[in-house]
Amino acid sequence: MVMTRFYRREFLRGAGVAVALPAFESVSTGPANERDRAKRFVCVAPTYGMNPAGFFPQQTGANYQMPTLLKALEPHRGELSMFTNLDHPGVGGGHGCSNTLLNGVEMKDTRDRPQRLHSLDQLLAETLGQTTRFPSMRLGSGGISWSRAGMILPTDNDPARVFARLFVEDNGKAKQKTKQYLAEDRSILDVVRQDAGRLSSRLARADRDKLDQYLTSIRGVEQKLKRQADWIDIAKPQASDEIIRGGDDDDTIVDLQYPYNTAVMYDLMVLALQTNSTNVICYGHPGGNRMFPFEGVSMGYHSLTHHGKRPELVKELAIIETFYAVQFSRFLAKLKETPDAEGQSLLDSTVVMFGSGMGNASAHSSRNLPVMVAGGGLRHGRHHRFERRGRDGRPLSDLFVTILQQLGVERDQFSNSTGNLNDLLT
């Protein structure tokens, strides 16, 4: 059979979103190992975790019963792996543990080396994100994405603004102003680098090491500026704004306020992946004591998480957490039905993680973190329970090592990992 070779950029383009060609037997979309390897990473993080009593299955293996909070995920159990007793050893309790989800360390323990705060998503952005307009997108509530320099990174919770960043072209004047700002920033960095170079010769060895770390951060900023400049004149993909308008019906109103904007944010995430605008996304459900406008919810979210096992409060909290599960299930379904540029489903080519750095919000516990992983070509369909050794369970970072390797990043260690979960998932 004669094979015709097509590449990622060969789409059928219409008035709306770019649509990938389907997979044909007579069409090769590149080397098999390149096609089959996962290429994208998404993390969804509820700040206060999930109530353990309704999240973790009682049975292990493939025939576990889906727990009460996660009934909406039943259709996806074949593409889903669940875990009990994954922890970040060394991380204490309190609200701050939510920020440790993707790096496994607390800020107070990294004063000597803040680079240890570098989070999984940002490490992946340095590899998977080098061919996309946005190395990573951080949406919703913040706190889990940390730069290589150990700085917490901002997020965007406005769907209209996210849509504009993805699909709305800047006018010529705005582009020129951006170019001017980037040139000024590069000039400032040139001066900083020259001054640092003159200072280096007068410093002791330990201080030179600190200066080298500082210059590494400067080089990272320079690379980001160059990336921004390279993408200014490249046209953005086209997409209909129905996603934030509600369609052609003028009577349809899309509520862009949280939590009603959750479905819209998920749809934007699918579009961002489908159009190759980014390969790395984090989406955080916010904490705080906001009132969820759902029937049956009478107290603020934070107050409900401190339920103390009182049945009436647990019941109200379950309404919110079931909403999270329903929306996440809808997101997985949309990824499954949406082809990527090679004709593979986005779910097959995207490792999707749902989890929190807080295990039991009622006790401010950072143990037994609520984590599940879907898609990405991993071996799914089972619930894995790990043994606890004293206070600690299996390091969550062992899962991160497997995710890194599945995404083509050959790392044998991340944060406080002691191994990997390849024997269970690959």
Image: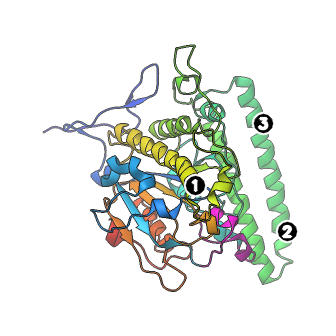
| Image depth: mark 3 or mark 2 in front | 3
Q: Which residue lies at the image location 77% right of the left edge and 48% below the top edge?
A: 186
Number of numbered discs overlaid on the protein picture = 3
Left or right, 59 with respect to 308, comes to: left
Q: Is residue 165 above or below residue 128?
A: above
Q: Marks 2 and 1: CB-CB under 8 Å? A: no
- Which corner quadrant holds the C terminus? bottom left
Q: Marks 3 and 1: CB-CB under 8 Å? A: no
| Image depth: mark 3 or mark 1 in front | 1
Q: CA distance from mark 3 to mark 1?
A: 58 Å
- Which amino acid lies under the numbered mark 1 shown in the image of this protein? Glu
Q: Which residue lies at the image location 59% right of the left edge and 26% below the top edge?
A: 254
Q: CA distance from mark 2 to mark 1?
A: 66 Å
Residue occupied by mark 3 = 180
- Which corner quadrant holds the N terminus? top left
Nearest the camera: 55 or 207? 55
Q: Which residue lies at the image location 47% right of the left edge and 41% below the top edge?
A: 273
Q: Is residue 374 above or below residue 180?
A: below
User: Which one is earlier in the sequence, the residue at label 3 or at label 1?
Assistant: 3
Q: Which mark is residue 198?
A: 2
Q: CA distance from mark 3 to mark 2?
A: 28 Å
Callout 1: SS: helix
Q: Which mark is residue 312?
A: 1
Q: Residues within 10 Å of mark 2 (few under 14, many from 20)?
A: few
Would you identify the image quadrant in which residue 211 lies? bottom right
Nearest the camera: 24 or 109? 109
Region in magenta: 90-113
